[in-house]
Image (cartoon, rainbow, N blue to C red):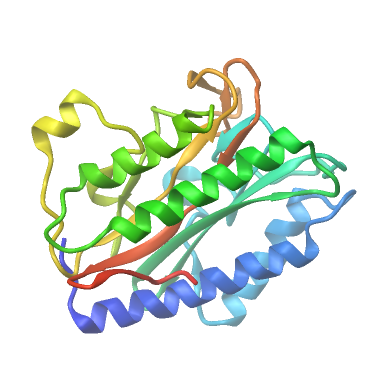
């Protein structure tokens, strides 16, 4: 759905809080810190800035942020688990501000990580930046998907297929879906991006096979082969001149 200039500025305000929360987590996420502590600190920060942590209670989700470690792809639930040297930690944050939402995610190293894990993070983050670079009004949505998939696979990794990016605005998930790979169904329903459309682009990639499953807590998504996964995300608005990132 296309947004008015006023709506975009409200989303930009939400995006600023989101980006600052992710900067904060980079400072405080260290070995022996629990993911519950990260959740508590980011929740306090978001509220102090006039924002609402919109993940909390969303479809029953119990916490304010998602923290996914190593083989956990998305929707990890913060708890008393302590971060360890060598972990990779994905943090996903959604903020509401005056009824408009922004959503972003990063994956970060805890201490020293393997060269292969570092490459996974670099490729995932670069695939997002490449997708943002080619996004502009009057381009096909599938170009985003193709750009991510081709770059990830060229570098020897795989795109998670069961979860996608999405439209965003007054609701967390709006149309259109933004897959990170090209499928026959995407090409059949492909659409032209219009100015003012706001979407969350979020590549989720893994070292091994792309098959996933959900743990017994009914939230945390993991790779079936338990190989590492990474996740980066920005909320953007489509313009005639390209993508305007609202969460940086």
* Quarter of the view holding residue 96: bottom left
For the point 11% across and 59% down, the residue is 138
Count of numbered badges drawn on the protein? 0
Compared to residue 228, the image places residue 145 above or below, namely below
Name which quarter of the figure residue 14 lies in.
bottom left
Residue at figure coordinates x 52%, y 81% from the top left: 50
Q: Residue at x 74, y 52 (%)?
A: 36
Quarter containing the N terminus: bottom left
Would you say 25 lies left or right of 7 here?
A: right
Q: Is residue 189 above or below residue 233?
A: above
User: Where residue 212 sits in the image (x, y, percent)?
Assistant: 50, 21
Left or right of 108? Residue 14 is left
Tell me what residue is drawn at x 60 percent, y 29 percent: 217
Measured as percent of width and height from the top left, residue 148 is found at: 39, 41
Task: Judge whether residue 116 can be spotted in this image.
Answer: yes
Name the foreground residue: 189 vs 119. Answer: 119
Quadrant location of residue 230? top right
Front in this rendered view, residue 86 or 45 = 86
Res. 231 in view? no
x and y, in percent, of residue 58 in the image: 44, 50
Give how far across and how far down residue 26 sits, in percent. Answer: 72, 63
């Amino acid at each position: 759905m296309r947004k008015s200039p006023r709506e975009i500025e409200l989303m930009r305000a939400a995006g600023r809080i989101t980006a600052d929360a992710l900067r904060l987590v980079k400072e405080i996420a260290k070995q022996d810190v629990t993911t519950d502590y990260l959740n508590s600190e980011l929740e306090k920060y978001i509220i102090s800035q006039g924002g609402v942590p919109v993940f909390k209670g969303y479809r029953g989700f119990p916490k304010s942020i998602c923290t996914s470690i190593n083989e956990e792809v998305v929707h990890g639930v913060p708890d008393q688990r302590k971060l360890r040297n060598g972990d990779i930690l994905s943090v996903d944050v959604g903020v509401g501000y005056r009824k408009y939402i922004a959503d972003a995610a990063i994956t970060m190293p805890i201490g020293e990580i393997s060269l292969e894990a570092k490459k996974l993070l670099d490729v995932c983050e670069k695939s997002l930046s490449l997708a943002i670079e080619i996004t502009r009004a009057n381009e096909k949505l599938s170009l985003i998907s193709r750009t991510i998939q081709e770059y990830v696979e060229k570098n020897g990794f795989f795109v998670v297929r069961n979860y996608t990016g999405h439209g965003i605005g007054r609701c967390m998930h709006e149309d259109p879906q933004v897959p990170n790979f090209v499928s026959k169904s995407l090409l059949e329903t492909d659409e032209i991006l219009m100015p003012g459309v706001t979407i969350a682009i979020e590549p989720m990639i893994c070292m091994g096979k792309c098959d996933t499953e959900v743990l017994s807590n009914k939230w945390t998504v993991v790779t079936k082969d338990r190989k590492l996964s990474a996740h980066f995300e920005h909320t953007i608005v489509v313009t005639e001149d390209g993508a305007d990132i609202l969460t940086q």
